[in-house]
Image (cartoon, helix red, strand yellow):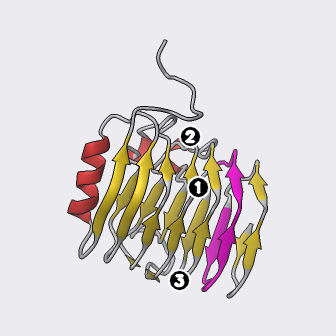
Amino acid sequence: LHLTGDYWRISDLRVTTAQKGIIIDNGNHNLLHGLEVDTVGDEGVHFRDGSSYNTLESSRIHDTGKYQSGYGEGAYVGSDASSPYEHVVIGNVIRAVEFAGGITAEHIDIKEGADGTLVEGCTFQGAGISGDNSADSFVDVKGVNTVVRDGARLTPLLGFALACAALVAWTHRGNVRRMRASTRSRSAPSTRR
């Protein structure tokens, strides 16, 4: 699904078996609610090319990166500095999203041009993170004024504490609060043999 407009509400929709899940380009003030995005070649949801004040909430994302594991982010805010897109994206929100495993890159990747991103109440299952293309954390933050809060990690991921430390180190004028870690899993299969 490629959205380029403003003030759209996309709800109760499943996006599956596509190259990319949902891409918003130059779209502002859009609401993505109650979605399921799964079994996609690259990223699940991407706020790209100047897209600002968008919200992704109460949704479930899983099984991304089926084509390119290093580019299988669950949610992606902004664009890499080397891309041709407008890098400044402001005030995007990711709230109450279940990143339900099989996500081969970061569950959330917030790029350098992102400003004022809020991530809250999300759950993260580490099963599936590939390590390809530096994919090694639940949330990777390079933007400014980012707040990550009230999240929970559900399955083991080597380096979770390191990933949280990286959030603080990479985030300028941002903060990380009330993140809980647990080795208990609600639905992800055990990786032990």
Residue placed furthest toward the right = 13
**Which residue is identified by label 1?**
43
Name which residue type carries label 1.
Answer: Glu
How far from the left and from the top, in percent, is residue 16?
Answer: 76, 51
Foreground of the two, 168 or 5: 168
Residue 23 counted in the magenta span: yes
Instruction: Please report whichever mark, 1 or 3, sits nearer to the chain's N-terminal start.
Output: 1
- Mark sitting on residue 101: 2
Q: CA distance from mark 3 to mark 2?
A: 27 Å
Name which residue type carries label 3.
Answer: Ser
The magenta span reads 22-41
Instruction: Please report whichever mark, 3 or 2, sits nearer to the chain's N-terminal start.
Output: 3
How far from the left and from the top, in percent, is residue 114?
Answer: 40, 76
From what the image shows, is residue 94 above or below residue 184? Answer: below
**Which residue is identified by label 3?**
52
Residue 38 counted in the magenta span: yes
Foreground of the two, 138 or 39: 138
Give the foreground label among 1 and 3. 3
Say what secondary structure mark 2 lies in.
Answer: loop
